[in-house]
Image (tube, rainbow, N blue to C red):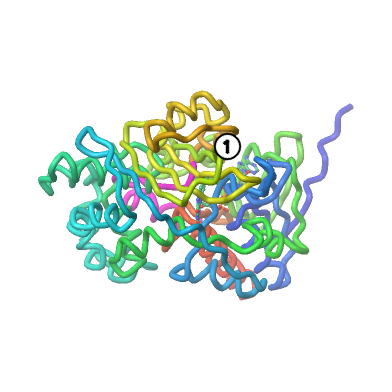
Amino acid sequence: MTTTPTPEQADVVIIGAGFAGLTAARELRQAGLKVIVLEARDRIGGRTWLDDRLGRPLEMGGTWVHWTQPYVWAEMKRYGLGTVQSPVPERAYWWAAGQRHEGTPDQLLGEIDEPNRKLVQGSRNYFPQPFSPFTSTEIKSIDEVSLPDKFIELGLSEYSRDILESFWALNFNGPVAGAAFTQALRWVALTNGDWMVNFEACATFKIQGGTGKLINGIAAGTDVRLGTTVASVNYAADKATVSTTDGGTFEAGYVISTLPLGALGAVEFEPSLPAQEQTAINEGQISKGIKVWITVKGEVKPFVALGSAEWPLNFAQAEYDQDGNTILVAFGPDTARLDGADKAQVQVALDLLVPDLEVLDVASHDWTNDPLARQTWPMHRTGFLTESLPGFQQQHGPLLFAGSDFANGWGGFIDGAIESGLEAARTIANQHLA
Ligand SMILES: Cc1cc2nc3c(=O)[nH]c(=O)nc-3n(C[C@H](O)[C@H](O)[C@H](O)COP(=O)(O)OP(=O)(O)OC[C@H]3O[C@@H](n4cnc5c(N)ncnc54)[C@H](O)[C@@H]3O)c2cc1C
């Protein structure tokens, strides 16, 4: 005779041990609640992962932080962590109007500046309070506008369009077709309308000791069950029941899902999620690109390169000196165009971007085909902001969604993950202690 195991009880079950889940767990534990975190991977950190590759610790996922990001900045202060700066580039390469161009990094920034300022000039009008994205009712009228729509409207030259398209394919880590103009405006509003500060936020300052150091600090003392994959969440009653693929069951007054939008489709929700949320899950995010670390021969002077949005890699910068060689970090907008573990393929892709570099070794993680992510950093499609995000931000009885995909401010960043984890924890703590 088989017996059904007794469900394990907690005040709150949190699904996912990334920055959102572990921040929420710490806050709720400190409020005196019993919390269990269920994590499918054999490690914490989620889409941040400081791993030993190419002879040194390398960030396979989220990396850069910035002083304009209040939540991650406060956490770094709390755990006594400063920043380490990426090398300041001395040369720049870019591709536009069918040609490679070479100059100073300031020249490249200058080429991006004029068209990009025109593109994002309304950011603070549409997002007057960047951490409250729904303040202006005007956003509804532009949420179906895609970046390519805007490029046409701006009447850009071929040269400027090539540069701008690649710049935003880099930011979206995906092809810009279907990429929401509102998402671009949200990003830039967070740096008070200044796209250059925003660009600085994306690739300049790393966490001292890496993301691993920060996430370990946040996780300390939390009950995390690694290797535990959630199969279903029943939130029909005033309690939630969470079932795992290995037959485990957990009952809790609240459950917080911190899964990326792309990974939500693998979990069965009972009752089914509302239509707008389900549509968003089916469509997924735009960001299905790739990040690759590349060791190239010799000591290469720091550079930055922006290629065509059509290439397998459209951005690279020199990041570390390593035993007389140089480690580059590179991004491409479509993981289907490049196997980041294939040295020969990466050499061909890098040759397009920068002349005369010899690839010695490569390291990458394919987040887009990773069933626990199915995307890189969350970047929205047209319509997501006004049609789907409000639903995810609402409480569904005992079920709440948190995570970088559903943040108010720096959605897409570590900062947004922490913000949304704090928000979900505060909602629950207020109700639980009321
Ligand atoms: C390549 C890359 C580069 C990036 N660069 C930057 C950057 O430079 N700066 C920056 O701020 N941000 C960056 N980001 C984004 C940042 O890493 C994420 O926004 C943030 O880490 C997301 O945290 P989260 O807790 O919301 O989600 P996640 O970290 O994805 O956590 C969700 C967790 O849920 C787990 N999970 C999934 N399905 C299940 C299941 N069924 N059962 C149990 N567990 C499950 C996952 O394994 C994961 O651990 C980058 C991301 C990537 C991928």
The secondary element bearing badge 1 is classed as strand
Q: Position of residue 99 (x, y in %)?
A: 24, 35
Magenta residues span 376-396
Using the rendered view, name the quadrant where residue 349 is placed: top left
Of 274 and 354, nearer the camera is 354
The residue that appears at 70% across and 39% down in the rendered structure is 244
* Kind of residue at badge 1: Ser
Of 290 and 307, nearer the camera is 307
For the C terminus, the image quarter is bottom right
Q: Which residue is mark 1?
A: 364
The residue that appears at 69% across and 50% down in the rendered structure is 44
How many tags in the picture?
Answer: 1
Q: Position of residue 363 (x, y in %)?
A: 60, 36
The question of residue 47 being in magenta is answered with no
| Relative to 382, 65 lies left or right | right
Of 109 and 300, nearer the camera is 300
| Relative to 73, 106 lies left or right | left
Residue 119 seen in this snapshot: yes
The residue that appears at 57% across and 51% down in the rendered structure is 320
